[in-house]
Amino acid sequence: MTRFGDFQTLCSQVPSYTWCNLFYRQLQTNDPTVLTGLSQSAASAPVGVNPECGIPKVNTNGSLGNIANIIACGLSFFVIGALIYFTGRRKAAVGRIELRIFFVLYLLTLPFQLITSGSLLTQGSTALVALTAIQAGLVATLFWALLANAIVATQIVEDGTLSSIVPFSVLSVAFFIATTYISLDVGFTFTHVLGTSNPPQSINSIPLFVLTSIWPGVAALIYFGLMMYIVLGILNEIRPVWYYVIAGILFVLSQLDYFLLSKIICRVRNA
């Protein structure tokens, strides 16, 4: 029976689910007999733990790795770079500095996403686990930065000042350190409190699940609610609402595509 915090279903049914890199190393160390099928050989194993469908490591039987992910990350790098540049030019914009920090954080996640989900490194390797842990820390921090931008937009504190930047930065560092440490503990099993799954095949970690799956969704939902309040309740504007609604719909559709359609696409690709 699936428990809260279990990654078993995600790691077997969602192709290239990044956080599974941590559990592969954990199983490789504590109970390698659990690794079967596509995951049995670390030299060619795709991202995931015993995935039903996966992209083999690059140069395995002609595999190019997760080429779609690589291209998407490469294009996103230039798009986000442009957003950072244009955001800096808008001198009168509310939360300009905080928004640039958010974009910079997103930019930093892209090379990690490219490597950790691209089937470029050997599963179970120290480098892959460390990079995945850092990416988890950046993702948790990114969604705090998203929520912080909504809080700054309410003008509770004056944007760009120490009263805004200091708590923004302190909590960003706290999210990054906490999530990165928990992720490293899951991969390298420093402790049996946060790290090792019990039993091993359950590949369970409630703290990691909360910080990488629950927290991003909660932060995005609160951000959406706060921005709706600001636009409708304070500014009395209608047109910006549609931008947020469209963005929200696209965000939900992208998640549905990732979690529900990616397996179908993977099977068709490998057929």
Image (cartoon, rainbow, N blue to C red):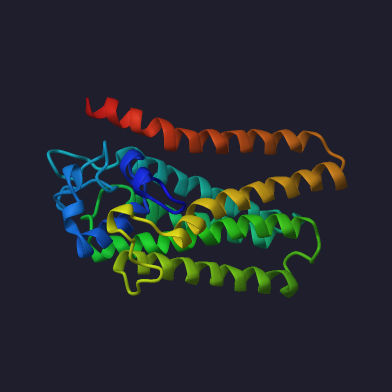
Where does the C terminus fall, quadrant-wise? top left
What residue is at 24 percent from the left and 59 percent from the top?
27
Q: Is residue 233 left or right of residue 215?
A: right
Q: Is residue 154 left or right of residue 244?
A: right
What residue is at 31 percent from the left and 69 percent from the top?
189
| Viewer can see residue 46 | yes
Please provide percent x and percent y for residue 11: 33, 46
Q: Closer to the camera, 256 or 173?
A: 256
Please provide percent x and percent y for residue 37: 17, 42
Q: Closer to the camera, 86 or 147?
A: 147
Q: Is residue 155 left or right of residue 264?
A: right
Please provide percent x and percent y for residue 143: 57, 56
Q: Quadrant of residue 233?
A: top right
Q: Quadrant of residue 66?
A: top left
- Examine the rendered structure and indicate whether residue 169 appears above or below residue 39: below
Q: Closer to the camera, 149 or 103?
A: 149
